[in-house]
């Protein structure tokens, strides 16, 4: 069977090698990133490995807002000072060993970027934790302290839930991320309330109307479980968490009588099957949970995010509904928000099985869109 994607990658590689000296940095770098990611995803072999210096990968342990965290660094194989990029992972139990995340970090380093990948416990364990934005912001500040990082050409990019946490961190009043040249995300969320309501009811609001949305079973389990981990009482956390794990996500209408007030209120919201009622129940949660959800929601301080935002979202995403991205794209704030929808990606992975079967026109259209998006992001880096 013909692989039009591989042919396009080969032609792109030739163009990069021949025209590299004549191209503006962002165009060449964007090409390197795409060719590196998609050649390795399609064939298992990195097509730019022969013409780009091998990244220098190292590990360290750093303090991030009082939490000791593993950090993996991907430094370009040549040069002494680089634009730097913080990568915030999604809720993967593999943490920094997630293959998809390491693929993009390697590609960025080959394109000349110093990459910091912190392993954040709340993401690895899929917990909704109020302190999460502070840890992400501390990671960005730590990255800028490296001698080979250029603070004037640095930004951050988040994947999945990590993208939402990144945007929430950028809206903090004392955020180091306020000094970033750009922020970006692949498949993030905008509001914990609407995200949770979509996951538990299988519904999203797009263009003013409700429509069915089918969450992936992993999202159906992990997001309600993450919400349960935000409960203040340990016994309640355990009881609600066990019920969610045993069912794969859905809860019975009636909450156990042994639960405390906060846990019963959350249970009622997570058991709801109607989108609007779920939102109303989430809005009426006790103060502690409400504060946590508000802190973790980019929507809360979106108007305080004063740097360009680049949001890439899979049109058929079953982990975060595309409505989250579309709502953020039109929400007012001082800087520009660019939303790029694509069918090539599969949530936060380079591509899904359906994309592999598409013809040349699909690949040309989708890769051209991704290249334009990548060039804009990298141009923002200066």
Image: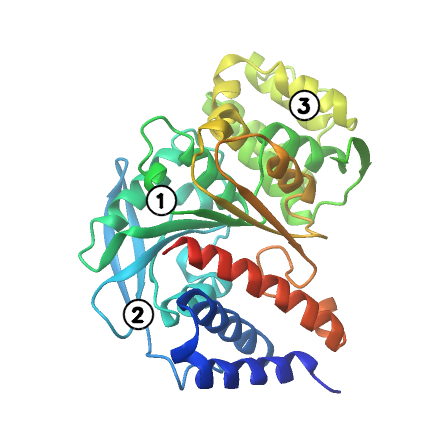
Percent position of residue 104, x then y: 46, 64
Q: Are marks 2 and 1 in contact (CB under 8 Å)?
A: no
Q: Residue 202's quadrant in the figure?
A: top right
Q: Quadrant of residue 109?
A: bottom left
Q: Residue at x 62, y 17 (%)?
A: 283
The colour scheme used to paint the residues is rainbow
**Total marks in image:** 3
Q: In the image, is residue 373 above or below residue 170? A: below
Looking at the rendered structure, the secondary structure element under dot 3 is helix
Q: Which residue position is annotated with label 2? A: 76
Q: Which SS class for mark 1? A: loop
Residue hosting label 1? 180
Element type where label 2 sits in the image: loop
Horizontal and vertical percent position of residue 190: 58, 35
Q: What percent of the width, then of the height, locates residue 154?
A: 33, 52
Q: Report the mark closest to the observer, 2 or 3.
A: 2
Q: Nearer the viewer, residue 188 or 269?
A: 188
Can you say which quadrant of the picture contains the N terminus?
Answer: bottom right
Decide which of tag 1 and tag 3 comes sooner along the chain. Answer: 1
Measured along the vertical axis of the image, is residue 228 above or below residue 83? above
Residue 307 position (above or below residue 237): below
Horizontal side, residue 108 vs residue 369: left or right: left
């Amino acid at each position: 069977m013909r692989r039009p994607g591989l042919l396009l990658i080969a032609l792109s590689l030739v163009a990069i090698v021949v025209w590299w000296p004549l191209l503006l940095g962002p165009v060449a770098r964007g090409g390197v990133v795409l060719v590196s990611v998609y050649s390795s995803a399609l064939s298992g072999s990195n097509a730019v490995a022969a013409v780009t210096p091998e990244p220098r990968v190292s590990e360290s342990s750093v303090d991030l807002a009082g939490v000791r965290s593993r950090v993996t660094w991907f430094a370009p194989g040549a040069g002494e000072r680089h634009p730097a990029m913080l990568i915030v992972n999604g809720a993967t139990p593999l943490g920094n060993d997630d293959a998809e995340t390491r693929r993009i970090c390697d590609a960025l380093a080959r394109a000349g970027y110093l990459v910091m990948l912190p392993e954040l416990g709340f993401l690895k364990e899929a917990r909704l934790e109020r302190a999460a934005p502070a840890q992400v912001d501390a990671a960005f500040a730590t990255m800028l302290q490296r001698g080979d990082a250029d603070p004037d050409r640095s930004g951050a990019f988040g994947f999945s839930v990590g993208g939402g946490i990144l945007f929430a961190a950028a809206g903090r009043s004392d955020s180091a991320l306020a000094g970033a040249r750009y922020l970006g995300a692949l498949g993030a969320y905008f509001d914990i309330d609407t995200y949770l309501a979509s996951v538990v009811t299988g519904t999203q609001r797009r263009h003013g109307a409700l429509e069915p949305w089918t969450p992936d079973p992993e999202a159906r389990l992990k997001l309600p479980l993450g919400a349960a981990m935000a409960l203040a009482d340990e016994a309640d956390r355990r009881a609600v968490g066990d019920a969610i794990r045993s069912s794969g996500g859905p809860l019975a209408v009636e909450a156990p009588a042994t639960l405390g007030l906060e846990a019963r209120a959350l249970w009622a919201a997570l058991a709801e099957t109607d989108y609007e009622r779920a939102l109303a129940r989430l809005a009426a949660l006790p103060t502690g949970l409400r504060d946590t959800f508000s802190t973790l929601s980019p929507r809360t301080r979106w108007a305080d995010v004063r740097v360009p935002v680049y949001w890439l979202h899979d049109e058929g995403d079953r982990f975060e509904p595309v409505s989250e991205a579309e709502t953020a794209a039109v929400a007012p704030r001082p800087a520009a928000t660019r939303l790029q929808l694509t069918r090539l990606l599969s949530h936060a992975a380079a591509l899904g099985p359906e994309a592999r079967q598409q013809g040349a026109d699909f690949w040309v259209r989708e890769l051209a869109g991704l290249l334009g998006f990548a060039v804009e992001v990298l141009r923002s880096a200066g």
